[in-house]
Image: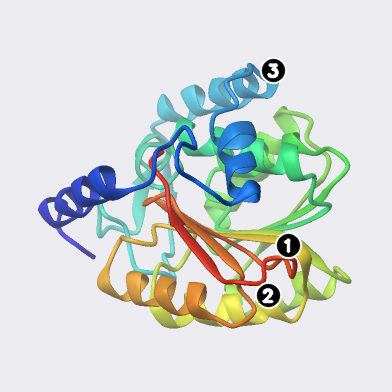
Amino acid sequence: MFSRFQLTKKYLRYYFTSSNGKGHGIHSPFVFDFVQHVLNDNRYFNSYQIVESLRKQMKQDDRLLEVLDMGAGSVISASRQRKISDISRSAVKPKKFGQLLFRIVNYYRPRSIIELGTSLGISTSYLALANPEGSLISLEGASEVAAIARYNFEKLVIQNIRLKEGNFDVTLPKALGSFDTLDFAFVDGNHRKEPTLRYFYSFLNKINNTSILIFDDIHWSAEMEEAWELIKAHSMVTLSIDLFFIGIVFFRNDFKIKQHFIINF
């Protein structure tokens, strides 16, 4: 992964060169609508308080979990034992992006959703609450972490989540087989080039015209940047949006010319 100094330099470059976060100068009607009604939707949703209360509880929980990391590893610890409080601070998307995930699902209303990387279930809860009519399958490799997430879903009485434990190479094909078509996927696990591309290619067999794929930490390392470049260059991708910490791709066939946007968020 990049050092903190390298990431800071990259973020500053992104900050000063990205398109205006209010939509000024963006000529794509679809992207302008996304900026206006999703990125800059300042409405308060009750689900925000529900999930952030859960996050607060997790930050105060010092129980130790055995974590088998099948991805690129933790940025804070090489130990297989980690506190729930540490996981909640380092391995869970912050409030800003959790709530953005909520707004994306709430606005576009995907009905079939897959998440790779449940962790403690914070982002999962945002995704599930955003569209209770949708069906969400979340995959987690660490069984003790999955147990905490499952307890959290029960505590919040979220009933449209199916949590599957195990290696993504085994659980993802089964999850994809549960859906005729895939409307939405959020990839937040195994931050390496080859697995990320493998997941992406697997999704392509199930996508439709309105599918949305979101990849976490696209600038986390050189190989994740390489994976992002290959994803957005794929012939089936017609639109990509780089928000630095996440990348979003769309497949709408009404976009006749491939477009790529880097937007300040």
Task: Residue 179: name its quadrant.
Answer: bottom right
> Where does residue 97 sit, x and y in percent of width and height?
49, 39
The residue carrying mark 3 is: 46
Q: Quadrant of residue 35?
A: top right
Q: Which mark is residue 203?
A: 2
**Residue 132 pos. (x, y %):** 83, 37
- Is the residue marked by circle 1 packed among few (<14), some (14-19), or many (20+) residues within 10 Å? many
Foreground of the two, 72 or 114: 114
Which residue: 74% across, 81% down? Answer: 205
The quarter of the image holding the N terminus is bottom left
Give residue 221's position: percent from left, percent from top: 27, 67
**Residue for badge 1:** 211
Residue furthest left as drawn: 5
* Earlier sequence position, callout 1 versus callout 3: 3
Instruction: Provide the secondary structure element on which disc 1 rests.
Output: strand
Q: Which amino acid does the dot numbered 1 rest on?
A: Ser
For the residue carrying disc 3, how many other residues have a C-alpha within 10 Å: few (<14), some (14-19), or many (20+)?
Answer: few
Where 221 sits versus 103, above or below? Answer: below
Residue kind at label 3, given as amino acid type: Asn
Instruction: State the separation of the CA atoms marked 1 and 3.
Output: 26 Å
How many angstroms separate mark 2 from mark 3 (CA)? 31 Å
